[in-house]
Image (spheres, grey):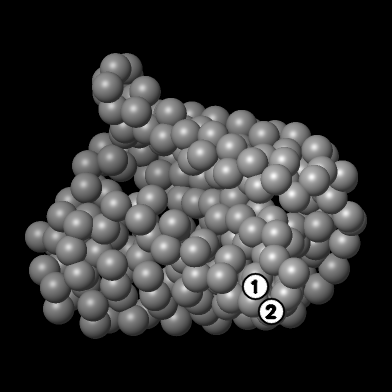
Amino acid sequence: MSESRLSRPKQISLFIFTIIFGFALFVIPDVFFGVTKINGGKIGINLLFMALFQVITVSLFIKFSLKKTGKSFKDIGWDFSKWKKDSILGLVVGLSWLVLQFLWIIPATGGADRSDVTHMISMMDGTIIGLISYIALGVIGGGITEEIYNRGYFITEMKSMFQNPKTGLWIASIVSILFFCLGHLPADALGWLDILVPTIAYTILFVATGRLTASIVAHGVYNMTAILMVYFMYF
């Protein structure tokens, strides 16, 4: 892994700035469409625009930040050299959580009456374009962009600030999990369960493999299939 070109204080400052500004880039399209209600707000084709904005701006900004420390995307796990093995791991994890959610948790906690389910249905707006756009948001904005930001960049860069790599990895992983969960604003214990379990799973995949492939596949596959399940089961 490349050595940082920056002093420790500057490295920490850059990390904090990247995390804060990167988070803002996720929020900007959400707020824009939510406030302006242009083309209906956060529904339909606008979800695709949100996904594209997030993946382009967040990825470019992280690339810029990594360049400042003499690193590249490969240093944060953008490595597909073992994509077959990693993809299988991701599929197993993503689909296992999907089965647990849709065969037990969601039916036992309200089904179609759950607030998150009704919210998802409203965002699809009842059209195929809306469904496809929501899947794009879940896969591109969630599965790819969030994994680059929350797992690849966050954990790798925070870990490098500690003299003891194992200590740094544990702390960075735990903080990353909490940050990711809080960023999704869980409102109650059920909300925490829904976001905490998969977040821990994605983090374990990234830490265990040292690559983003497995966590991207798990996150993207779960988001895509969950959206399809909600559409066909509850719409």
Three-letter code, disc 1: Leu
| Along the viewing direction, whichever of 44 and 116 lies nearer the viewer | 116
Image coordinates of residue 28 in percent, x first then y, are 43, 28
Image coordinates of residue 235 in percent, x first then y, are 21, 53
Q: Residue at x 84, y 50 (%)?
A: 4
40 lies above or below 133: above
Q: Is residue 56 left or right of residue 188?
A: right
Regarding residue 138, the answer to whether it shows in the image is yes
Q: Secondary structure at mark 2?
A: helix
Mark 1 sits on what residue? 169
Q: Residue at x 15, y 55 (%)?
A: 115
- In the picture, residue 32 is in which quadrant? top left
Q: Is residue 193 left or right of residue 59?
A: left
- In the picture, residue 82 is in which quadrant? bottom right
| Neighbours of disc 2 within 10 Å: few (<14), some (14-19), many (20+) | few
| Neighbours of disc 1 within 10 Å: few (<14), some (14-19), many (20+) | many
Q: CA distance from mark 2 to mark 1?
A: 5 Å
Q: Determine whether label 2 and label 1 are within 8 Å by CB.
A: yes
Q: Is residue 198 left or right of residue 77?
A: left
- Mark identifier at residue 218: none
19 lies above or below 53: below
Image coordinates of residue 228 in percent, x first then y, are 37, 58
Regarding residue 213, the answer to whether it shows in the image is no
Three-letter code, disc 2: Lys
Mark 2 sits on what residue? 166
| Along the viewing direction, whichever of 21 and 106 lies nearer the viewer | 21
Q: Which quadrant: the N terminus? A: bottom right
Q: Residue at x 58, y 44 (%)?
A: 16
Q: Secondary structure at mark 1?
A: helix
Q: Residue at x 43, y 71 (%)?
A: 198
